Image: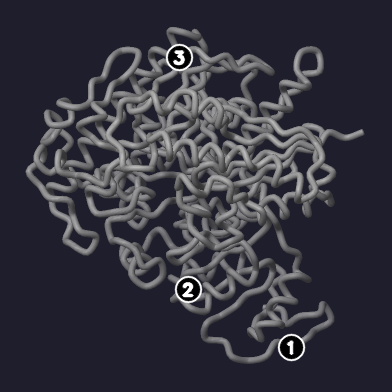
Amino acid sequence: MSLNILGINAAYHESSAALLVDGQLIAAIEEERLNRIKHAKPARIDNPDELPVLAVNTCLNMAGLSLSDIDIIAFSFDPKRRIAHNTQINDLTTPDDWGTETGEQLFCDKLLSIPERLQQMGFKGQFRWIEHAKAHAASAFFPAPFPEAAILSIDGIGEIESALLAHGQKDNITALKQIIYPNSLGFLWEKFAKYLGYSEYDACKIMSLASFGNSSRYRTQFDTFIHNHNDHFEIDGHFIRFRLEDYSTLEALFGLPQRPADAPILQEHMDIAAALQQVTTDILLNLIHHLHQLTQSENLCLAGGVALNCVANRVIFEEGPFKNIYIQPAANDAGTALGAALLVYHNIYGGEYYQPLEIPHTYLGPEYSDEEILHTLQALDVPFTYCEQIETTVAQLISEGKVVGWFQGRMEFGPRALGNRSLLADPRDPEMVKRLNRLVKHREDHRPFCPSILEEDAADWFHISKKALAARFMLMAYPVNSSKADQIPAVIHVDGTSRIQEVQATTNPKYHRLISEFKKLTGVPILLNTSFNDREPVVCTPENAIRTFLRTKIDYLAIGNFLLDKTQHTVQKKTTSGYEVA
């Protein structure tokens, strides 16, 4: 008899689901890819019971199961732990909102209604609340290729903690130290994102902005409300006012009003972002040194939204004491669905039954056959050709300056497009950044693009002092080798670094072949890779991909073995293989 465990994340944002069957990961999916709403839903006190029903159903369908077949549901939040502690925090709050007795009670009541609601949907098994930070920790440790590791989970907030230092050993994770709200790097980035004119979800924009700034200009101001110690850090909650839409203290400290979203970006904004990045890196360095002292491990695992900071990740690994690093690719809250399921599984099948479960890639979502893609093409009445050697054709198009949508295989789990739901372009073209940002992605010009590089060539093109598994997932920003920089201007940020993806032939052979074909044509083993979307979640289905292709300035779409051309208006012709062959 099989053991079916469903992990669910829904308390805040990045709602998601993950399914384990007898310890094998069948699927992991973010709800936003299906409901087409960024982050799936906003984090509010009145909506934690909005479940990722589409993600759950997709996971179940991929396994041929129904909700009644699930033995255990693991939910990555513990409301009873939250209500026991959160209202005790002396914080500035908005009436009936976060941190107030009425607001916190509403939030927890909504969460506590979830088991009954799932039963009404057909669930008959056990329901387990999993501590949020432990779910993050489990998502990083159990998929890693290490039998033992130091673990750092660091984000905005779980139930009460913003960071967890832990030690993973085979089937067990031991908590060593917690850092409690309001001492939160995740919330600090959200607050400054809004102060600098962005949304709370735009930490990546602040990180790219930081590269244009001088980190020392405002460092003294940060030191007035952030105190970095060897084993922890403290943030003055009454000054920063995380739970209020109040920026008066920051405006007074920096002598700069909150930037309206449509206002110009000034050098002062860049310098504030740079100081924030440096403070974050310094805090993380102290924490991992302390974690190493506690564990004496050679291996480090990271998760939590702060672990998506690719600039800090490289510094803390290369300057820190650990020899190996693994970062959960879905380091944001989406990954806690996976972590919750893994934690429950290893709690049941630990000890003598323990078996490691390495997850070497992120291709964990739905995929579509050529037959399914053809059905969608015909339903939308879109002209196409069929390519037996799609990689060769697309490599040639990219080398000629074309922008190609690349839709292949299983969808990625996590915020990065890693070669299955990607927009691809020539990294040699210095004008490609402006073209993509303005005509395709419709985003700020200071946002960089990332290189996908053949793993075997990475060390020739980038300065990599310590090999990192995390480089496979765009989680490390490396300096480009000076002798190569002029060959790939479109994927180098202003600070001379690139957030690389090392592509393996074993985990994504089709994408590896495509880059290899491009290398044959150009001598460059790199493609510019950005997520296949236009101000919405990354495309998931063939229809998502085709509609995004049709309404944007993308030149071609390679979807399965079918090729769509913006300039093509002829109806496809059948051949002996069934399709017109390019």
Q: Residues within 10 Å of mark 1 (few under 14, many from 20)?
A: few
Q: Is residue 430 visible?
A: yes
Residue at 38 percent of width and 14 percent of height:
289
Q: Residue furthest right?
A: 1
Q: Which residue is mark 1?
A: 573
Q: As rendered, which of 302 and 399 lies closer to the eye?
A: 302
N-terminal-most mark, 2 or 1: 2
Q: Residue furthest front?
A: 102
Q: Which residue is mark 2?
A: 554
Vertical arrangement, residue 547 with respect to residue 519, above or below: below
Q: Which mark is residue 204?
A: none
Element carrying mark 2:
loop
Residue at 32 percent of width and 50 percent of height:
205
Q: Residues within 10 Å of mark 3 (few under 14, many from 20)?
A: some
Q: Residues within 10 Å of mark 2 (few under 14, many from 20)?
A: many
Q: As rendered, which of 516 and 528 lies closer to the eye?
A: 528
Q: Which residue is mark 3?
A: 177
